[in-house]
Amino acid sequence: MPVIKYSTFLIAFFLFGAIVPGWAQAALSLPETVISHVKVLTANDSRLAVSATVQDSAGIIAARCYFRYDSSVPYIYSEMNRQDTTKYTAELPYPAEAGSTLDFILLSVNENQQVVVSSNYQSLISKGAKGDARPNLQLYSETISYKDALSLFADHEHITIHETPVTNNYGVLAGLYDADQVRGHTVSGYFGAFTSTMDGTMTARRGLAISLDSSDIRENNFLAGAARVDLSGKYWAGEFYRTDDYEGTQQDITASITQNGSYVVVVTTSLEGLGHQLVGKIYSNNHLLLYDQYDGEDWTTHYGPASDHYVLLADYVWNMHGHPLNMISLHRATFDPHPTPVIKDTKNLPALPTLLLKQ
């Protein structure tokens, strides 16, 4: 899994193996989010608090504290409220049993809809709650089994857990849950979520994307923004090749493309391993950033945006060098490029197969 320092130079080499063109720097730059000075506060006898400094030059649109007291129960989260320019605080319930360990992760979303999570933190909560906490605490869940968490909290009768809309399931995108813990059909891949560590590195995180129906997509312009093209279709045909014409690499291929809003899955039905399944996002400028589910390498529309009828994807063979590149060139076909053969002449067939054909 790639680890990237906060450096424009290194970012460029990670994405393309060379300095990226202007469109990519604007659309695909790594987030500059910094999450630091994380503290657990227990001064209040009825509620805990987690505070942190969250900074990003692009601006923060959401900050959350995902937490649990039992590792067998999925994370739920509390919204973090801004106290000043960079300080955020989340209110949490005490555990039902003193001596429980608070397991939590902080998550932020910047104005570019990039999701960044902190390292995992654990804190022993040695004391229990004293007295009722009011008003009611509002918590949120992205899973189907969130009600199991209530019994683990002190003063749970004054806690309400809400279901998060699918388009705001940032914890799902960041890989905080397993596929069987969330609603709907999911696709695994890299969808622009990162882990920010204290030494200033960003690590790409594998997460889940939940398929949305067309009405959800129209009503919720989320993540990378609405692309102007629709790539969905079963019948795409083209070729896989290397730019140095390396012997034996060129081959004709077919593909199917699924597009749900900003999420894109390309399956090349004629390839195995490298380039077979690519998962990622399409941006509002119709450029794609996809990750190969075989080896984690990124594929991009390096030479120009996609159109309704043509996609050209590139992947550097060696990350830290220029050429050669692996290329996938696809044109939309108006019919199945490899249809099932239809037998029209039955005169010379053996007797048994002839009987099985429609007369």
Image (spheres, rainbow, N blue to C red):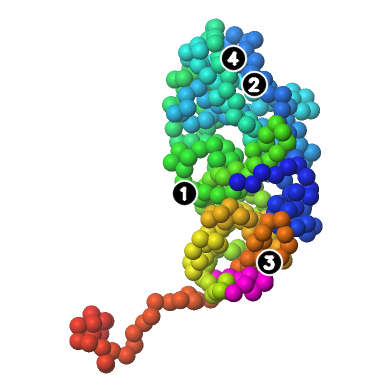
Q: Which residue lies furthest to the front in this view?
A: 247
Query: Which marked residue is nearer to the observer: mark 4 or mark 2?
Result: 2
User: What is the C-alpha distance between the residues marked 3 and 1?
Assistant: 37 Å
Marks 4 and 3 close (CB-CB < 8 Å): no
Label 1, on which residue? Answer: 185
Residue type at numbered disc 2 = Val
The crowding category of the residue bearing disc 2, from other C-alpha atoms within 10 Å (few below 14, some 14 to 19, many at least 20), is: some
Residue type at numbered disc 3 = Pro
| Mark 3 or mark 1: whose residue is earlier in sequence | 1
| Mark 4 or mark 3: whose residue is earlier in sequence | 4
Label 4, on which residue? Answer: 47
Label 3, on which residue? Answer: 324
User: What is the C-alpha distance between the residues marked 2 and 3?
Assistant: 49 Å
Local secondary structure at mark 4: strand
Residue type at numbered disc 1 = His
Residue 154: x %, y % from top left: 50, 14
